[in-house]
Amino acid sequence: MTQHSKPNDKKERIGVYVCHCGSNIAGTVDVENVSHWAGEELKDRGVVVSRDYKFMCSSLGQELIEQDIKEQGLTRVVVAACSPHLHEKTFRTATERGGLNPYLCELCSIREQVSWVHTDKAAATEKSKAVISGAVERVIHNEPLEPLHVPIHEATMVVGGGIAGIQAALEIADAGHPVYMVEREPSIGGHMAQFDKTFPTLDCAACILTPRMVSVGTHPNIHLLTWSEVTRVDGYVGNFTVTIRKKARFINEELCTGCGICQEKCPKKVIDEVYEAGLGYRKAVYTPFPQAVPKYPVIDKPNCTYFQKGTCKACEKFCPTGAIDFTQEDEVITVEVGNIILATGYELFDPRRVTQYGYGRLANVFSSLEFERLSNAAGPTDGNIVLRDGVTVPKAVGIIHCVGSRDRNFNNYCSVICCMQGLKFAHLVKERTGATVYNFYIDMRTAYKAYDEFYQRVLEEGTLFVRGKVAEVTDAARLPGEEGKLIIQVEDTLVGKQRRIPVDMVVLSAALEPRKDADDVAKMFGISCSADGWFIEKHPKLDPVATMTEGIFIAGCVQGPKDIPTSVAQGAAASARVLGRIEQGEIALEPVRASINEEMCSGCRICNDLCPFNAILFHEDRMVSEINPALCQGCGTCVAACPAGAISGTGFSNEQILAQIEGLLLLNMVHPTMAVPA
Amino acid sequence: MTDTETFEPIIIGFTCNWCSYRAADLAGTARVKYAPNVRLIRLMCSGRLDPTFVLKALSGGADGVMITGCHPGECHYLEQNYKALRRYMLLKRTLAQLGIEPGRVKLVWASAAEGVHLAAEITKLVEEIRALGPLNWPTAGDGTFPGELGVEMNTHEEVAA
């Protein structure tokens, strides 16, 4: 008789399969020993077969399982290999092919949680035995389950109207499915709309972007919601209900023709901090730029003279179609969508934080976004690269890389685009001013197609490269020739000497950072952020646009810094994932759900308030609670709380967990051979 | 076994499918090393943790228990980790009343990105439990609780029968 309190009276026939994973597991765990041990010591617990194999996930490994199910009449399968998050599906499918319900297979991790994290082979081997013992006890209590099939709503929501979001929206809309695009600013376009040229081909950003923007604005399948923000997300994959606050534009979109007379006549000038990066002005009624989509302007309430002082209404007076409506109020709308793509982009690192570079204190130190506007033909200087005074053409320009990136004080990560951006700036300065250009870099990173060729081109154009992290930018002249200049103090690490390089203009290639509200957005959509604040993808290599939450996808810089081609590729990738879902029409969900045994429910209602998804209904007439399986997400909090033990959590039942505890502690052994306190 | 120098504690760890279990996976992928004394159980959420599971583990031979979940405000199920926190606070008091050092049970928040943090917390807890020594909770070692506690958990079949 075993010491186990609840004998395996169901007489299950269990197969145990231990994977070598090449040397990944076998290098630290004595796999043959473990497999032999399970076959011998767990015999009383129903283990009838125990095998080890080089790669269980290979087709031959999977066939082993299928064969044993058929030939040995297995009723349960335990695979000891990698994490369930990697291969649970593989082995469940193999189990199903063998003729068993897939949920009667249990995968336990002896790779991520044993062989890769421990070095002592004896201890790792013993731990593997305990882990397998736990899985064997648990699998006895596994029940055959059927996945839940959920219909997928045809519409998709794309949040963020930058290039990644635009690409995603167009792909889905072109395939014939409805898309809601939500953008916080008055126009779509994102950061790309602010740029002049794009590296390495030097295409004009507006020339390639605006046709796409127009396509979004006029597409019959795209419902564009600009000047709008998502405030609430309810539901689950296939059936999201999204609440959106459409901020008051104070413009009647039905009547407005986008003629721009209101902007001309508005007497209030405001510094444009967003689109012009603080270098230019806009009016209180404005479209961010001439090619804005949609064409309707917005009235900036905090800066509008009428709203602040009660008189003015110049725009209303001159509007030829009477489209100005000061009484408009924020509108709250809800839409039903099946999938959501988040493409909310990045924010530029505030270079003021690197105080020694003098941004905000020294007039002629510019941020990269300011330089983009300065060099843009449609920008505040008509594309003339000049100093802050607006007239002087610089004779020498220093471009500093890695401002806020690859710096322990700010962000450890590389912002990816800054090297190429610095090269692009160098080229533009050379081309337009003939000035001497210095690039101060830590490492030049010009990977990807045609990037290194561009680097060579800029080298040949005569841009000077200094390898070293700039210590300081100062206007305190010490040497002759430094008066009136900005002096860049740097250690040239290739020469091994300190240098002071006088220039007229400094451009800081600032880091890309997550949006300030990334945490709130992640919470609202039920996904997670990394420690840096970028949204976490489902798998860093194999599933870069999906998230851990079904139905929520990410594209572009929300996932991490990236250039335009990669953002576009991600937008398209996310849309492909969504289109696959829409085509299938439904999705099979894990049947991990809670259910209430009405016989045992006392009607105490403790569970009712615990459920965050309002999935538990109380029937007043019968005085019992009931769980709606479509709303239940399977967290199991109610299961743990029920004083009557009336709630059962499918896939994670009390029986399964209690048995697994016993197994892990080897209480199921006839002769405890391992460290169990007597 | 009782010699603290050779004493290797056994710790049962309860992990959340969305954060700490993934943190454990990440620790593996990144080859972060930690003490082999912890054996993990995957739950869907720290909110699933019935305090009875902890008592079961301690009575069954575990010297310590680690409960892990998403950071406050980051629960995959919105706020269930707060419920885990409440139960943990109550459980600590109950353990003290049973004469068990509350330090044997520890709640750790670990996001899916915090493999290094989780590994460090595991190694730290192993050392803390090692310092406390073996638990040796009076039990027959058969997984049942001493009769007077009467907290043996009924299975659904038993109750229904």
Image (spheres, grey):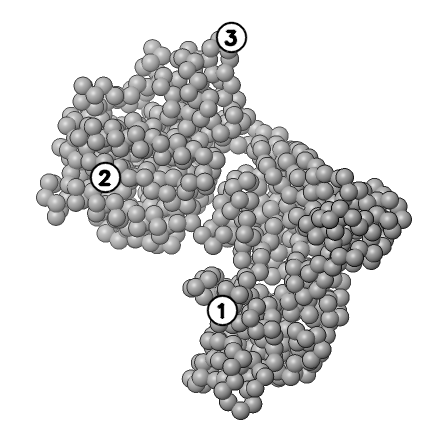
Question: Disc 1: which chain?
Answer: A
Quadrant holding the C terminus of chain A: top left
Does residue A97 sit above or below A598 in this rendering? below
Judge by depth and name the residue closer to the eye, A107 or A229.
A229
Q: Residue at x 52, y 68 (%)?
A: A403
Q: Residue at x 74, y 54 (%)?
A: A284
Q: Do callouts 1 and 3 point to residues on the same chain?
A: yes
Residue on which the image places disc 2: B103
Judge by depth and name the residue closer to the eye, A12 or A583.
A583
Judge by depth and name the residue closer to the eye, A108 or A481.
A481
Question: Disc 2: which chain?
Answer: B
Q: Position of residue A343 (x, y in %)?
A: 61, 49
Residue on which the image places disc 1: A355
* A380 lies left or right of B125: right
Q: Which mark is residue A157?
A: none
Does residue A442 sit above or below A77 in this rendering? below
Q: Is residue A186 visible?
A: no
Q: Position of residue A570 (x, y in %)?
A: 61, 53
Q: Amino acid at mark 2?
A: Gly
Q: Position of residue A308 (x, y in %)?
A: 71, 48
Secondary structure at badge 2 equals helix
Q: Is residue A441 visible?
A: yes
Per the model, the C-alpha gap separating discs 3 and 2 is 46 Å
